[in-house]
């Protein structure tokens, strides 16, 4: 699913309204919350035999991951790179995103009962588990971002606003 991109420069100290600042989680919490939600949907997908439920869960997973990868690529990853997070780590994350996007396109172009539908969702789940582990591990990207000179609260506000915009765009296309 193509979503319009607005290139955003990484921000240190992005200041928004006080209400938005209180409501938005920091960048890492926002991303971890996304991870937990998608993990839950993958588990539900694995445990159901209902084609309609599988279709709904896969659609939720694909939409959430599409938005998640956009906010990471547009806001979080550039900020990490600017703050000096290791290029190898960032490059690997970019490649993992590209692979996930291809699989998401294949899932969205198919339906339960189609050849390899469940297998595609299962492989996407495994790819995402690997990606999440690398981001969240003790010496992973999130730990490096915390150590860097990043305004995680400001990034979280920016990412939450972008996430809301992207979700609105995607829902209008459905």
Image (tube, rainbow, N blue to C red):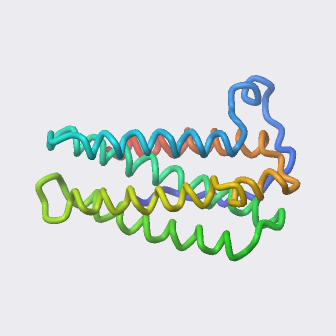
Instruction: Tell me where residue 45 appears, x and y as whole percent.
Output: 28, 44
Total numbered circles = 0
Q: Residue at x 60, y 52 (%)?
A: 71
Quarter of the image that includes the C terminus: top left
* Left or right relative to 139: residue 149: right
Res. 39 image quadrant: top left
Q: Residue at x 11, y 55 (%)?
A: 113
The vertical placement of 87 against 17, above or below, is below
* Left or right relative to 73: residue 39: left
The vertical placement of 6 against 151, above or below, is below
Q: Residue at x 43, y 63 (%)?
A: 127
Instruction: Tell me where residue 33 appears, x and y as whole percent.
Output: 56, 39
* Left or right relative to 83: residue 23: left
Quarter of the image that includes the N terminus: bottom left
Res. 104 image quadrant: bottom left
Instruction: Tell me where residue 168 appears, x and y as whole percent.
Output: 47, 39
Instruction: Tell me where residue 169 appears, x and y as whole percent.
Output: 46, 45
The vertical placement of 11 against 30, above or below, is below
* Left or right relative to 149: residue 167: left
The vertical placement of 136 against 18, above or below, is below
**Which residue is nearer to you in this view: 23 or 90?**
90
Q: Residue at x 72, y 63 (%)?
A: 78
**Which residue is nearer to you in this view: 72 or 86?**
86
State the residue lying farthest toward the left.
113
């Amino acid at each position: 699913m193509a979503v319009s991109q607005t290139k955003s420069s990484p921000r240190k100290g992005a200041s928004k309204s006080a209400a938005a600042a209180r409501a938005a989680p920091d960048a890492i919490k926002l991303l971890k919350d996304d991870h937990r939600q998608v993990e839950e949907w993958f588990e539900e997908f694995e445990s159901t035999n209902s084609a309609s439920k599988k279709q709904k869960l896969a659609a939720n997973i694909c939409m959430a991951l599409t938005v998640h990868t956009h906010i990471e690529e547009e806001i979080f990853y550039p900020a990490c790179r600017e703050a000096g997070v290791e290029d190898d780590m960032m490059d690997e994350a970019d490649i993992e995103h590209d692979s996930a996007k291809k699989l998401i396109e294949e899932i969205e172009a198919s339906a339960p009962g189609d050849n390899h539908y469940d297998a595609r969702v299962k492989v996407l789940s495994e790819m995402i588990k690997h990606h999440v582990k690398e981001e969240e591990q003790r010496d992973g990207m999130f730990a490096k971002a915390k150590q860097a000179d990043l305004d995680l609260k400001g990034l979280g506000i920016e990412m939450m606003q972008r996430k809301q915009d992207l979700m609105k765009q995607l829902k209008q296309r459905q």
